[in-house]
Image (cartoon, rainbow, N blue to C red):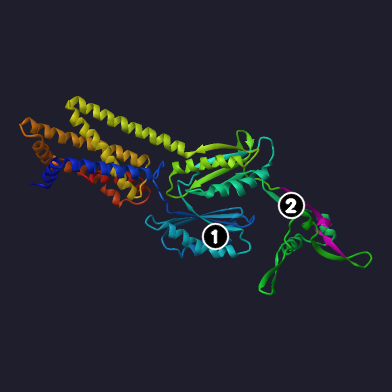
Amino acid sequence: MSLADSVATLATRRPVAITVLAFAIALVGFLAWQQIPVDLLPDLQSPTVAVSIRSGDRPPTEMERIYGEQLERRLFTVRGIREISQVARTGQLVATVVFDWDANIELGVVDVQKAVGPMAADPAVDEVLVRRFDPRQAPVLTFGLTAPSGQPDLAELRRLARRQVAPGLEQLNGVAEVWVTGGREKEVRVTLDPYRLEAFDITLAAVERRLIDENVDISAGTLEEGSEVYLVRGMARFRRVEDIERVVVRHITGSDGGRQAIRISDVGTVALVDREIDHLVRVNGIEGVGLAIYKEAGANTVAVSKTVRAAMVGLAEDLPGVELTEVSDDAALINTALADLQSAAGLGLLLAVVVLAIFLRSVGATLVIAAAVPVSILATLFLMRFGSQSLNIVTLAGLALGAGMLVDNAIVVVESIYRRLAEGESPETAAATGTGQVAGAITASTLTTCVVFLPVLFVEGLAARLIEGIAFRWWSRCSPR
């Protein structure tokens, strides 16, 4: 007796045990289904890191000459890099670092940060930013904040978004970062009169140097009193516009022979104004502030969307006079796409069952085949959960194709069992022998389909990441057979 005959005989002799096993598989599959991340596309994990260096308003040629060559030399010490490309702009240098597809990108980001970290110590460098590039790095949700009445103003609206709304959202489970765009930012603008500077023999560099020197907090050591130790600091940083106006630039000899202090207010004006903007955010025609919410890697997009939208209701109550408008929601697109695919797959399965009922003309056989499909799908979902796979359009397509193959094989088995019944065998014997007779043929036909995906093991790059989801589904569906 072959292995297939033995398994078929065991199934016919232990129907209760087989039924309980099927229910158990369906149960664990259902529980795993609740924990599988839901997304539109598979996790592509592009091995690309972006490095951005900002330095004032230097021209592109100077940015490339000063920082471009230095950056490349430092990046050459990082292992696993396949390609480095740079783009120089006014005051900014952006380098794109591409790693090998089999490299550990998480460690790669850390190594790049260590390599370029010393460049941040240069006083002329304003910012060194290292970010991992992800093709799916798009905001899950986008909200707009507006104040129709004009109060609070745009500067206060941006401050509320950065200090109140964004921190509250970043504490939520699954939220990685919240970007605030638009609005206005305040800055202190010092406007100098060139004629007065020339009259007092003062240069722009001297004014800049004096402002930098005065805007510091000086440590004055410690003061011990009994068992207590106090840290003493000289608080000299600017707090108000008047503090800047009173800064002494130089001393000159007055008409009476005495020393006279020349202050910032004597050579120019100081005002708190809105910083110049390089982008504008409008919500329903009203200028406001935008919130772009990014999810953590591997987080469930739909779950993150629900969590954020529920939190927004509470945050809106703490912002009187501010309207929160939902601009975009990726979860809605994902739900629509997955619902369409699920309905199509379900309709296809229903049509297959109807065709079976018409041609088999047996309610029992039709129900057996129809029940085998959900059990097989739930078993595959259980394997997906432990295979770190997400539920997306690619994996759902694999499930639909696998369900079709399962129905084909079930029809062959049922036909073989019916033929044995027609020859006069008992139902138990017909089920065992009928299944055993076609088990080899079914296994061979199924494997011929599954081996098509074997070359995926040798494919590298983006194509492998896109195909491996559907290939995983096929092999997980083939394994029980």
- In this rendering, position of residue 418 left or right of residue 318: left
Residue 85 vs residue 183, the one in the foreground: 183
Whether residue 348 sits left or right of residue 189 in the image: it is left
Residue matched to label 2: 189
Q: Residue at x 11, y 46 (%)?
A: 6
Question: Is 12 part of what is drawn in magenta?
Answer: no
Up-down: is 18 above or below 457?
Answer: above
User: Badge 2, how many Cα within 10 Å: few under 14, some, many 20+?
Assistant: some
Name the residue: 50% across, 64% down.
115
Question: In the drawing, what numbered circle is on residue 404?
Answer: none
Q: Give the quarter of the figure containing the C terminus.
A: top left
Residue 39 placed where, x, y %?
Answer: 41, 42
Q: Is residue 265 magenta?
A: yes
Relative side of 268 to 332, left or right: right
Quarter-of-image position of residue 251: bottom right
Where is residue 57 drawn, in percent x and y?
A: 64, 55
Ranked by sequence position, the earlier of labels 1 and 2 is 1
Instruction: Give the number of the disc on residue 68.
Output: 1
The amino acid marked with disc number 1 is: Gly
Which image quadrant for residue 444? top left
Mark 2 residue type: Arg
Mark 1 to mark 2: distance in Å? 32 Å
Magenta residues span 260-273
Up-down: is 431 above or below 459?
A: above
How many marks on residues?
2
Q: Nearer the viewer, residue 74 or 162?
A: 162
Q: Position of residue 40 (x, y in %)?
A: 41, 41
